[in-house]
Amino acid sequence: MHRRRITCLARLLLGIFLAASLVSCRGSSTGQAGSDSTTSSTRAAPDPCSGSSAVDLTSIDIDVDGRTREADIHIPVGADDTEPLPLVLGFHGFGGTTADLEGDTGLFEEGDAKGFVTVLPVALGRPSRWEVRDRESLDLAFVDALLIELEARICIDPSRIYTTGFSQGAAMANVVGCSRPDRFAAIAAVSGVYDPRWRETCVGEPLPVIGFHGVLDPVVPYRGDSDVGGRPIIGAQAWAAQWAQLNQCAGGPEALPPIGDVEPLFWTTCSAAVEFYRVTEAGHSWPGGVHDDPDMGGATRAISANELIWSFFERHAVPA
């Protein structure tokens, strides 16, 4: 299995192309980060790892098929813009916002502590939603364009790009990773919506996956059937088992000792790791997150999804 790795030269060439395109980006309140959008096509864009990276970039706008798409960006405080950084894309849930996801998870603070760039894309629609049923959807085209632009502007390590999400955002992260395994090193899904046809979006390559789901989830039932909107879904553990099949696991799931109300399940002898955390006394929530809503089944404090996800991500990179 061979996965494509973008070199600094490739990023330079991408920068030249992007400077001549109609992509527009907005920077922080200082206006410094957005000034590159008028760069002449006759002048090469600077290498983002040469000390000229947009370390103050807080958001970005790009044109995808005639529509403006947006994402919020958090670069670790004190980041060295000559040292390639890992990147985590985080997808908010159905009807949600990037502020909701950040408020629930604290991913920006985690990025500061662990040294990764956090990018939270914005879904379209009212209510907002991700298109996750088609490998060639406009949302996946948005992700492709976003990665190109980010690598042209920020010193990113192309072998350490990861994706995570909550609720329908977890379904988006799932599709993003399985349809583009040459670009993403691992997936983390939390309380996700799992369409029974999700494997139709995959190219068939193994990819490390970690998942979390509460047994008491009233929005996305743990055992499947249909979600709160009446859409058919597979069970959360069944989703993990399907990844284990895709990742060619020979054994498992093996139950590890419980951590409070959390039961870890690991598949073994795999081409790529599959880890799943069943939360027996919680529902539609981010483990260790800020919100603990009884109407959503409550939340667990026994584990931190942030810590487990980042620990998992750190162990995986796209092969050269």
Image (cartoon, helix red, strand yellow):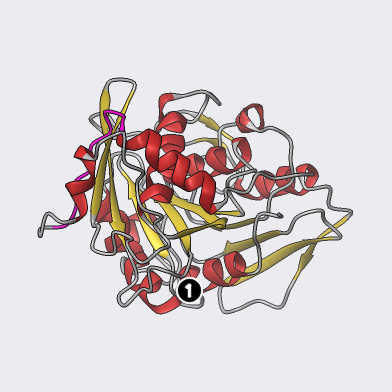
Residues in magenta, as a range: 20-28
Count of marks overlaid on the render: 1
Q: Secondary structure at mark 1?
A: loop
Q: Quadrant of residue 254?
A: bottom right
Q: Is residue 252 above or below residue 288?
A: above
Which residue is situated farthest in the top direction here? 66
Q: Is residue 206 above or below residue 232?
A: below
As for residue 26 lying within the magenta part, the answer is yes
Instruction: Give left or right: position of 222 versus 32.
Output: right
Q: Position of residue 13 (x, y in %)?
A: 46, 40
Name which residue type carries label 1: Ser
Given residues 316 and 38, the one toward you in this image is 38
As for residue 133 lying within the magenta part, the answer is no
Residue found at x 50% / y 41%? 171
Q: Position of residue 257 (x, y in %)?
A: 71, 78
Which residue is situated farthest in the right direction here? 250
Residue found at x 65% / y 44%? 4
Q: Position of residue 121 (x, y in %)?
A: 34, 45
Asked whether residue 228 appears in the rendered view, the answer is: no
Residue found at x 46% / y 70%? 83
Q: Is residue 112 above or below residue 89?
A: below
Given residues 142 and 99, the one toward you in this image is 142
Per the image, the residue denoted by label 1 is 304
Please identify the quadrant where the C terminus is shown: bottom right
Residue found at x 29% / y 64%? 55
Instruction: Give left or right: position of 112 versus 174.
Output: left
Instruction: Give left or right: position of 171 versus 20.
Output: right
Q: Position of residue 268 (x, y in %)?
A: 83, 61
Q: Residues within 10 Å of mark 1 (few under 14, many from 20)?
A: some
Asked whether residue 17 appears in the rendered view, the answer is: yes
Given residues 291 and 110, the one toward you in this image is 110
